Amino acid sequence: ISGYPCYRTVEETYTSAQSIVTQYPNLATWTSIGDSWLKTKGRGGYSMNVLKLTNRSIAGTKPRLLITASIHAREYTPAELSTRFAEYLVSNYGKDADVTWMLDSQEVWLVLQSNPDGRKKAEAGASWRKNVNDTQRCSNGLFGADLNRNFNYAWGTGGSSTDPCNETYRGVGAASEPETQNLQNLMKAAFADNRGPARSDAAPATTPGVYVDIHSYSQLVLWPWGDTTTPTANATALQSLGRKLAYFNGYKPEQAVGLYPTSGTTDDFAYGELGVASYTFELGTAFFEPCSTFTGTTLPKNQAALLYALRVARAPYQLG
Ligand code: 0X9
Ligand code: ZN
């Protein structure tokens, strides 16, 4: 990215992921989870991919940490943090005892670029947030659906817009966007085989896994709900883990609605639909920050928080 060489483009991110797999075939796979909106229309676009990390010679269902990054196109920092976190893990396997144990006994699934079409538009100079669905034209130029208002849990219940030209447009229906569908299916695959059928706000006593959706900015660690001040059934445990994550990155921990009301978000879906301990990180103090700030502060603090999330993925609710 011009002036900010530490932030890899979509293509550079994909190349980095592929080279992790080439270098560490026993630790990493890189597979498609579906197409971006443009690709579904045959207008260019991208395959969306998940990078899965674990010691593949130890079989069995392992607790998973799922990370989605940069679902908002102009938020560059999350994708770079996630890519570097992956590189840190594979390059320290067999060297660092904690990393080795974590990749032996758990899995990390990373969607490094969760909105590649939008991200490309941001890289071309636009301050772009949403996907690039231009079915509904906008005189302000701001077409597209806000993917973080499009998820299929309590969709459209407030804190999102019905105006296609608004930055928080919820889309024509729940999970109307291909990016949302791809991410929801991935979440179900990550957690469904550990959990019972979909349920709403039940206590997932024996069902391990942690989900972190990474955004920028505001220095926050958030957890469900986003659409109501009513605490979840697992509020004590979610808060307990949220505060520990916030201890590592130094951010402010709070229930998501405390920032402002939202609905149809990633974290409410993961928790409300699948029972997963789910968090949203808001990194730093800008959508993207000077490389010295990123590598000196944002990266180390949040890498520590993500390592902790991975460590506790086998029993996230027991912290409460
Ligand atoms: O509005 C959003 O989607 C997030 N902020 S951002 O500036 N990255 O767009 C905050 C979402 C907070 N709510 C939930 N995570 N539920
Ligand atoms: Zn965001």
Image: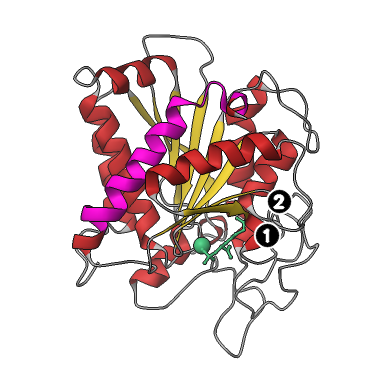
CB atoms at circles 1 and 2 under 8 Å apart? Answer: yes
Magenta stretch: dominant secondary structure: helix
The quarter of the picture where residue 100 lies is top left
Please identify the residue farthest to the bottom as the structure is shown: 139
- Side of 252 where 83 appears, left or right: left
Instruction: Kindly identify which numbered label has been placed on residue 257.
Output: 1
Instruction: Kindly identify which numbered label has been placed on residue 225.
Output: 2
The front one of 169 and 144 is 169
Q: Mark 1 is on which residue type?
A: Val
Please name the residue shown 36% across and 46% down the image: 302
Where the C terminus falls, by quadrant?
top right
Label 2, ligand 1: CB separation under 8 Å: yes
Can residue 33 be seen in the rendering of this structure? no
Q: Residues within 10 Å of mark 1 (few under 14, many from 20)?
A: many
* Image x and y of residue 158, in percent: 77, 66
* Image x and y of residue 47, in percent: 46, 48
Which quarter of the rendered image does ligand 1 occupy?
bottom right
Q: Residues within 10 Å of mark 2 (few under 14, many from 20)?
A: many
The quarter of the picture where residue 75 lies is bottom left
Q: Mark 2 is on which residue type?
A: Trp
User: Under tag 1, what secondary structure?
Assistant: helix
Give the number of callouts.
Answer: 2
Q: Which residues are magenta?
A: 294-318
User: Under tag 2, what secondary structure?
Assistant: loop
Label 1, ligand 1: CB separation under 8 Å: yes
The front one of 176 and 248 is 248
